[in-house]
Every structure is written in structure tokens, then in C-alpha cells.
Amino acid sequence: MKLEEVRRTLDAEWSGRRASRADSMGTEVLSCHASDLMSDVLTSRGAGSLLLTGLTNAQVVRVAVVSDFAAVCFVRGKKPQSEAVQVAEESQIPLLVTPMSMYESCGRLYTKGLPVGDRAKEAPSCQKK
């Protein structure tokens, strides 16, 4: 799914510099991760994935860059902090803002066929002894 289709699906707005938006529209998004726990995000393989989060600080963008995410989308209409926008522009990672909750965002993307990211690394189920 192209990032522009993700944007339309989530009724999202671009955040950051206008010049980078046109370049980002054609970015391919392969899967989706949703988390506010950056420690969980760091343990996932983010290559080509979209990160949905309610956290708006620069650390979120740094984690997305280190984990090779395609883009970050902030949920519930939360705007990224100015330092987060600056880090994103320096790292050339697109930022989106959706008015939807994380739950609704995940549901819409899943319905459109965007798979869950990193299923191979899901935690094993607990076993009773």
C-alpha cells in the first residue's frame, strides 16, 4: 500500500515540510505496527512498516529511524513536537497525523489489506505447568 493511500484511509494530514510530502506519497508501506511502548518497537523489524503511536516526542522518530520504519502516524489528532518534526526532516521520514484512535486506525488499515508487522517475532504463548 502506498503512503498516500494510507493517508487517505486514515483521513490523515501531513506534518512537517511541504517539499518532502510529494516525495513521500509514493513510499511503499509493507505492514503496520501500533505501539506507545518504544521498547516494544525497538524489538520489532520495522523495515517498510508504518508506526502508529500516540507519543509525539523526538524519541519516537529516532526509534522509527533506527528500526527502518517507512513513516510515523500520530493518532488521536496529536501533533508531533517541534523537535520530532526536525528529527524527521533530517532523517527524511514522513510524518502523518490522524484524528482517529489507534484502534480505529489499525482496523481501517487491516480492512484495506495492510498486514500486521512482524508476526514472526510475536511473544510465545504462556504455557501452564
Image: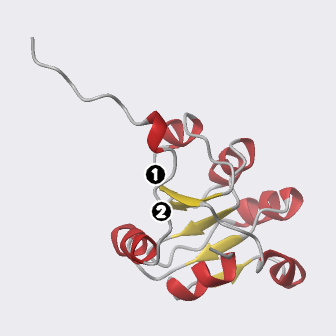
Q: Quadrant of the N terminus?
A: bottom right
> Residue at the spot x=56%, y=59% of the render?
31
Badge 1, how many Cα within 10 Å: few under 14, some, many 20+?
A: some
**Cβ–Cβ below 8 Å for labels 1 and 2?**
yes
Q: Secondary structure at mark 1?
A: loop
Residue identifier under label 1: 36
Q: Secondary structure at mark 2?
A: loop
Asked whether 55 or 63 is in front, the reply is 63
Find residue 19 and report its horizontal and vertical position in percent.
90, 82
In the picture, measured across the screen, residue 77 lies left or right of residue 89, that is left
Among the 4 quarters of the image, the one containing residue 82? bottom right
Q: Amino acid at mark 1?
A: Asp
Q: Quadrant of the C terminus?
A: top left
Q: Amino acid at mark 2?
A: Gly
> Residue at the spot x=38%, y=73% of the render?
101
- Establish if 67 lies above or below 52: above
Find residue 40 and report its horizontal and vertical position in percent.
48, 38
> Residue most toward the top?
129
- Establish if 98 lies above or below 123: below
Nearer-N-terminus badge (1/2): 1
> Residue at the spot x=76%, y=80% of the render?
25
Residue identifier under label 2: 54
